[in-house]
Amino acid sequence: MDEDFEIIGSIEEIETIAVGNRIREIKRLREAFGAGRWRKLKGIATVRFDDGTIHQVELHWYEAHGIGRRKLKIKDYLD
């Protein structure tokens, strides 16, 4: 993963936003990472940035069984 942050601990309050063809980027995900049952998820996590600051954020990401978590993105800062 090429993010500029590190997840500290676990991601809480995980919710599924979309599955399969309901994901706008499904074609791109399959081309880049392979076929799978892709899901778009969101959750709350504490992250540490490269500059050392720590924040609680809402994350969005894509995930497929056997492929794992891809394209993590911070959607909102909660603190």
Image (cartoon, rainbow, N blue to C red):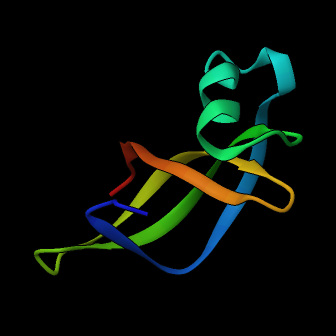
Image quadrant holding the C terminus, namely: bottom left
Look at the picture and state if 12 lies above or below 15: below
Residue 43 x, y percent position in the rendering: 63, 53
Q: Residue furthest left?
A: 51
Is residue 5 found left or right of 52 in the rendered image? right
Residue 10 x, y percent position in the rendering: 62, 77
Is residue 14 found left or right of 76 in the rendered image? right
Residue 67 x, y percent position in the rendering: 75, 58
Total marks placed:
0
Residue at screen point 68% across, 20% down: 27
In this view, the residue in front, 78 or 8, is 8
Is residue 77 found left or right of 67 in the rendered image? left
In this view, the residue in front, 36 or 72, is 36
Residue at screen point 74% across, 43% down: 34
Look at the picture and state if 39 lies above or below 43: above
Image quadrant holding the N terminus, namely: bottom left
Look at the picture and state if 66 lies above or below 19: below
Q: Quadrant of residue 22?
A: top right
Is residue 52 found left or right of 28 in the rendered image? left
Q: Quadrant of residue 2?
A: bottom left
Residue at screen point 65% across, 45% down: 33
Residue 8 x, y percent position in the rendering: 46, 82
Residue at screen point 71% across, 33% down: 30
Look at the picture and state if 77 lies above or below 45: above
